[in-house]
Amino acid sequence: MRSSKLLAIIVVAAAMTTACAVATQSRSPATTEAKFGRPIAEADIAPWDIDIRTNTGKGLPPGRGGVAEGKAVYEAKCLACHGPDAKGGPVYGSMVGGIGSFTTSTRVLTPGSMYPYAPILFDYIRRAMPMDKPLSLTANEVYAVSAYILNLNGLVPADAVMDQTSMPKVQMPNRDGFILDDRPDTHAVRCMKNCP
Amino acid sequence: MRRDTDQTRLGRRGFLRRSVLIAGTALAGSGLARAAAGAPLEVPPTAKEPGRGIAETSYGSPSKYESHVMRHRSDVLVNRQNLSDWSMAPIQHQHGIVTPNGLIFERHHAGVPDIDPKTHRLVIHGMVKQPLIFTMDDILRYPSVSRFHFLECSGNTLTDHSKAASKTVQQSHGLLSGAQWTGVAAARLLNEAGLDPAGKWVLFEGADGSNHTRSVPLDKVMDDVLLVYAANGEMLRPENGYPLRAFIPGWEGNVSVKWLRRIKVSDQPWDFRSETARYTDPMPGGKWRQFSFVMEAKSVITRPSGGMRLPGPGLYEILGFAWSGRGKIRAVDVSVDGGKNWREAELAEPTLEKSLTQFRLPWTWDGTPAKIQSRAVDSTGYVQPTIQDIGKARALTGFVQHHNAIFPWAVSAGGEVTNAIV
């Protein structure tokens, strides 16, 4: 009894030695236990923490901006590429219209026709626009220029003010326009001879 | 320019035959060459003098005779600026399943940043027990993982669904590359931060001027996602994400966020612009398909392909690539009669998961018009569809994404190869 137990231990130990020998060919035991990340406080991440959960507006910062201020921001910082009244310029096409076009043969994609949630405007403009100086607009400027684009698309009135509370409430026409991935949606058959 | 070059290169065998006939010498392996003799071979001048000496330090470049093998900025769909733009890889010149680093396709949303790895940081936070920050030195200390995978933009082939817009396979399929990617498993660093059990989605964010961001399901991230710092044996090129990028095997390239600086865990996706207004598929009834991540099985013949010319009837090798985001390529079939009859091609080893796989089939062209095309079958049994099959399920309009249809090339009686998608 005792000797068979001992034998089993020896066999297991031998097997483990072999396994270790194989494992150490690619990585040392020290690095498999490696932990090199250093703790950081969420407060210190805040300058990078710019994402917005666009369907609820979670992450929208304090601040506010209206349509008229947005027109001024737009004309100073956006018009050169996007053109007057956001109808298209030398670099980018129109950001106005297209609502109702998706059931026609030519779909016109604009923030008004395409965005399911208004806070996408805030998230995207802040992180990526203007193209020559991203992350340079203040929160008030981003709210204002978002209000202006939404107004040009007929989605908010001329006296609308965008902020943390009002922006997620804007009803976007494409809100229910999305379906989740249901592929494979083609069912091709592997025909080899005299195929149709 | 490229078209002429491709004709010249494809016609090399014919060119050799003509040269041989002119020279009248015998070359082993050529029936024509055996016919005559009379002009003895000249000893090449390079055999009669030393070549370049070895530089003290160097980084090699392709031969000056290969200067036609270049990425090319999108010229079928032309963007009005080159910051949010793309360039196509010259896959008609690619040998084997690896795309050289200088030729891997580009897609940027605000140009290419030059990031100093000494100052670059990666942060993991959100629904984790302990937010963590890493330097590049930290990341390089972990055990590395190297795997061969394809990378394909969801918009590859987007110009060619309703008309034959592209002349070459570089234009129609050049948002595709293959490489051996090296990095650390994303799961490893997320486990180090400690996942909140309610976490379901992961945000990847870049340090480029677009601060590009995508939401990716946590299950995929924990399965096979890599945080990559090297490709094909060297650190990433700036245009491919130096010093660090996400790499999401088998999924649309856009989610493999370059210049990666932030990972955040959440219980919901974010519905960013890049996953609502863009990278979604037009569907019937005015709808859009969202989060269609996986790149389904696809193949294309790269040789002979658009813009090339067959110098005359005879034996050719049909060569191409197949790949699937769902697994391995199980088979590739080739038709030379427009899809009526098919023959199974040979798959060149290695055939790897979510990797380019090269196929080949000998073909004797009789000199009459032909239509050549390939069809991939992957390890799930999925069969590559025709564009008509796709049109039955989706709306083929505007920015058609995830277009993985069979792609035919027409060969004229004169040997000209042209795009025959419709």
Image: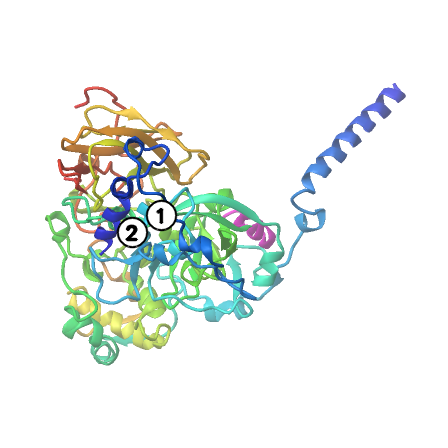
Indicate whether B378 appears above or below A115.
above
Q: Amino acid at mark 2?
A: Tyr
Task: Mark yes or no: residue B63 visible.
Answer: yes
Q: Which residue is mark 1?
A: B252
Residue B85 location in percent, x, y? Answer: 29, 61
> Which of the image's four quarters has the N terminus of chain B?
bottom left
Residue tagged 2: B279
Q: Check the image and report above or below for A56 versus A62.
A: above
Residue at horizontal 25 percent and vertical 67 percent from the top: B81
How much space separates mark 2 and mark 1, taking CA atoms?
9 Å
Q: Which segment is the magenta one? A: B185-198
Q: Outermost residue, right direction?
A: A2
Q: Nearer the viewer, residue A123 or B357?
A: B357
Rendering colour mode: rainbow
Of all chains, the one bearing label 2 is: B
Question: Circle 2 — which element?
Answer: loop
Other-residue count near label 2 (Cα within 10 Å), few / some / many at <14 / 14–19 / ≥20? many
Whichever of labels 2 and 1 marks the residue nearer the N terminus, that label is 1
In the rendered image, residue B166 lying in the magenta stretch gets the answer no
The answer to whether marks 2 and 1 mark residues whose Cβ atoms lie closer than 8 Å is yes
**Which residue of the protein is positioned furthest toward the front in this rendering?**
B38
Q: Of tags 2 and 1, which is closer to the observer?
A: 1
Q: Which mark is residue B86?
A: none
Residue B286: image x %, image y %? 17, 46
Q: Are marks 2 and 1 on the same chain?
A: yes
Q: Does the magenta segment cover residue B194?
A: yes
Quadrant of the image for the C terminus of chain B?
Answer: top left
Identify the element where label 1 is drawn. Answer: loop
Q: Residue at x 53, y 46 (%)?
A: B146
Q: Is residue A8 left or right of residue B167?
A: right
